[in-house]
Image: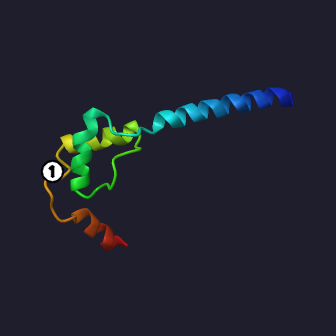
Amino acid sequence: MKIVELEKIVKEQDKRIKELEAKACIDEPPEWAKEACVNAKRAGIIDTSNNGSRDFYRFKTVLDRLGYLIKTCRPNVFANEVQKIS
């Protein structure tokens, strides 16, 4: 391959990577994930719900719908477990 062809490929890949990165990060949670984000914050699992990926929001929503996110303000049990490990 010629260097010119390789430069063209690299430019195309760079453009595609930027497009994919822009799609991966969502500034605010989608409407369908907002309740799960609130519940995850209350449970002390996350400290912010912005700038996540679509998969991040889907995962939180699934956890919430399965009842794994505590929906009331309780002491942060998760943080206590992390401290034990540290």
From this view, report whether residue 46 is shown above or below residue 79.
above
Neighbour tally class for label 1: few under 14, some 14-19, many 20 plus, Cα within 10 Å: some
Q: Which residue is mark 1?
A: 71
In this view, the residue in front, 12 or 28, is 28
Colour theme: rainbow
Residue at the right extreme, as displayed: 2
SS for dot 1: loop
Residue 40 appears in the figure = yes
From this view, report whether residue 33 is shown above or below residue 46.
above
| Horizontal side of residue 72 vs 11, given as left or right | left
Look at label 1 and name its amino acid. Answer: Lys
Which of the 4 image quadrants contains residue 11?
top right
Q: Residue at x 27, y 33 (%)?
A: 31
Residue 77 x, y percent position in the rendering: 21, 65
Residue 4 x, y percent position in the rendering: 84, 28
If the image is split into quadrants, where does the C terminus sit? bottom left
In this view, the residue in front, 86 or 22, is 22
Residue 1 appears in the figure = no
Q: Residue at x 78, y 31 (%)?
A: 7
Q: Residue at x 24, y 43 (%)?
A: 36
If the image is split into quadrants, where does the N terminus sit? top right
Residue 62 x, y percent position in the rendering: 25, 40
Residue 18 x, y percent position in the rendering: 59, 35
